[in-house]
């Protein structure tokens, strides 16, 4: 499956995702996010903006993800921590943006 | 100035176990950490969380594991230098390393083990252009003295316990208090949140985030905020208290003469040797192909690095290998004899 990633410079990259991995793991392999804490919800270094048309198709963030988004910067209404989004076939084509910073 | 065999940078779980691992080989250690207490991320980020993957500990609270590691290390009488960052590293002609801490003191050591995790913890700074110029004048990341805020038009940014508690404490001190937070919910003690929401002197601005600083580079005249997903607004304010927790910073190690790859230090697997002789890296900061970032991996790396450090401290001297069951541990040995 593919994740369509809009980089801060405006370019678009199709990143290969695998069923059972998180979006963060796919993005980190492509050096697009840090994913410093390995998905332990101890940092916000995998913060992404989900494209609006995809935002409602994802399971909503839980309380722990919301708490960690509190210490992220440059937020949008569709901000998510990509480590908390698990890839499934239904998410093939998921479109998101990498924030310019934070 | 203090002289030890091994200087350990980072007092997280892996740095603490490195004290024990070195101690078992007769090496005395000094441990530096930017935080005032040992434990690294376990203390700073999740002391109450249970950990389930420590061998032999079906479940252990992070804070409890730290206390046990401190106790285990205590047998070897380490020197703790807490609350100061390891800043500079120099090497004498005889191969002795000199590490200077941010408080200006120096540790002399024959070997250095970096167990720095994600780096020295410092404030998580909002990425606002020009913010550095205002720091400690108009922008603060913690409250050292209430008087610094007297009579000021204060914006508190953040949504945790510290933001809520300081909003309540500073209302009587600052001329105005506005709390800017990205959502209506606060991750703080419910009673305190209720008190803050009921206090007419505290202006709550949610769901908003910081967007910019307006001023001359010394004095702040306004703070730009942005409704999440919406437009920018300008708040008249001359002081910002930004409370977004802690974040790791490895920048002070950049000049230490070993390779740094983004946020990790590449090492030789097994020996944990960095590209600079006599300096080893272990735990989350150390990287090699197939590395698992687990506490238990760091423990094993600590034992390996200790053995390498021994060879550096005692060049040419054979290492007599003994398990802890044979070697014993100071304190416990005495107890056994007494019994």
Image (tube, grey):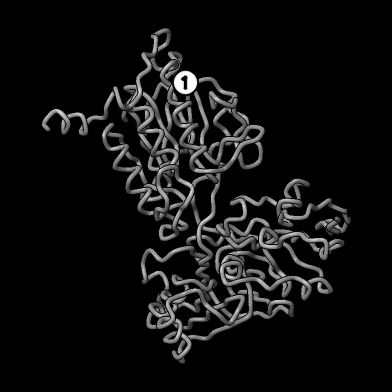
Mark 1 neighbour class, 10 Å CA radius: few under 14, some 14 to 19, many 20 or more? many
- Left or right of A100? Residue B103 is left
Split into 4 quadrants, where in the image is the N terminus of chain A? bottom right
Split into 4 quadrants, where in the image is the C terminus of chain A? bottom right
- Left or right of B204? Residue B73 is left
Q: Is residue B4 visible?
A: no
Label 1 sits on a secondary structure element that is: helix
Q: Number of callouts in the render?
A: 1
Q: Residue at x 51, y 27 (%)?
A: B280
Up/down of B199 relative to B294, above or below: below
Residue B273: give x, y in percent of width and height.
Answer: 55, 24
Residue B24: give x, y in percent of width and height.
Answer: 33, 26
Q: Residue at x 46, y 75 (%)?
A: B188
Q: Residue at x 40, y 30 (%)?
A: B7
Along the viewing direction, whichever of B11 and B174 lies nearer the viewer: B11
Disc 1 is attached to a residue of which chain?
B
Along the viewing direction, whichever of B68 and A74 lies nearer the viewer: B68
Along the viewing direction, whichever of A17 and A80 lies nearer the viewer: A17
Residue A32: give x, y in percent of width and height.
Answer: 76, 51
Question: Residue A43: which quarter of the image?
Answer: bottom right
Q: Is residue B134 visible?
A: yes
Along the viewing direction, whichever of B1 and B303 lies nearer the viewer: B303
Q: Residue at x 62, y 50 (%)?
A: A36
Up/down of A94 relative to B333, above or below: below
Q: Which residue is mark 1?
A: B308
Residue A99: give x, y in percent of width and height.
Answer: 74, 61
Question: Residue A47: which quarter of the image?
Answer: bottom right
Up/down of B259 relative to B284, above or below: above
Seen as rendered, the residue at the extreme left is B338
Up/down of A40 relative to B310, above or below: below
- Left or right of B11? Residue B180 is right
């Amino acid at each position: 499956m593919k994740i369509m990633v809009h980089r801060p410079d405006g370019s678009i990259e199709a990143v290969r995702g695998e069923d059972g991995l998180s979006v963060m793991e796919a993005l980190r392999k492509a050096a697009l996010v840090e994913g410093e804490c390995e998905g332990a919800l101890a940092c916000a270094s995998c913060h992404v903006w989900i494209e609006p048309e995809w935002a409602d198709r994802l399971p909503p963030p839980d309380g722990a993800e919301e708490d960690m988004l509190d210490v992220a910067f440059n937020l949008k209404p569709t901000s998510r921590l990509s480590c908390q989004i698990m890839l499934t076939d239904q998410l093939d084509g998921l479109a998101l943006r990498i924030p310019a910073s934070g | 100035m203090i002289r030890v065999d091994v200087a350990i940078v980072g007092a997280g779980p892996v740095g603490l176990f490195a004290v024990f691992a070195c101690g078992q080989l007769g090496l005395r250690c000094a441990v530096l950490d930017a935080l005032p207490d040992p434990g690294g991320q376990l203390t700073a980020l999740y002391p109450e969380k249970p950990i389930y993957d420590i061998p032999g500990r079906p479940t252990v609270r992070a804070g409890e594991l730290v206390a046990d590691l401190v106790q285990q290390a205590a047998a070897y009488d380490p020197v703790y230098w807490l609350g100061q960052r390891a800043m500079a590293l120099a090497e004498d002609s005889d191969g002795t390393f000199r590490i200077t801490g941010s408080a200006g003191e120096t540790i002399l050591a024959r070997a250095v083990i970096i167990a720095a995790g994600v780096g020295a913890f410092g404030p998580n700074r909002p990425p606002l252009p020009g913010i550095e110029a205002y720091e400690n004048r108009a922008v603060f990341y913690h409250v050292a003295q209430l008087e610094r805020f007297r009579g000021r038009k204060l914006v508190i940014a953040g949504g945790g316990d510290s933001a809520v508690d300081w909003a309540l404490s500073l209302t009587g001190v600052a001329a105005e208090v506005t709390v800017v937070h990205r959502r209506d919910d606060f991750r703080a003690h419910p009673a305190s949140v209720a008190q803050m929401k009921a206090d007419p002197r505290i202006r709550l601005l949610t769901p908003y985030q910081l967007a910019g600083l307006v001023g001359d580079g010394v004095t702040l005249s306004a703070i730009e905020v942005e409704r999440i997903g919406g437009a920018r607004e300008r708040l008249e304010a001359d002081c910002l208290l930004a409370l977004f927790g802690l974040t790791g910073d490895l920048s002070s190690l950049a000049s230490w003469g070993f390779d740094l790859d983004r946020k990790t230090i590449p090492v030789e697997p097994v020996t944990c040797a960095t590209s600079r002789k006599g300096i080893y890296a272990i735990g989350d900061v150390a990287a090699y192909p197939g590395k698992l970032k687990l506490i238990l991996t760091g423990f094993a790396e600590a034992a390996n690095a200790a053995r390498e450090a021994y060879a550096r401290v005692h060049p040419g001297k054979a290492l007599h290998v003994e398990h802890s069951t044979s070697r014993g541990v100071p304190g416990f040995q005495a107890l056994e004899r007494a019994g």
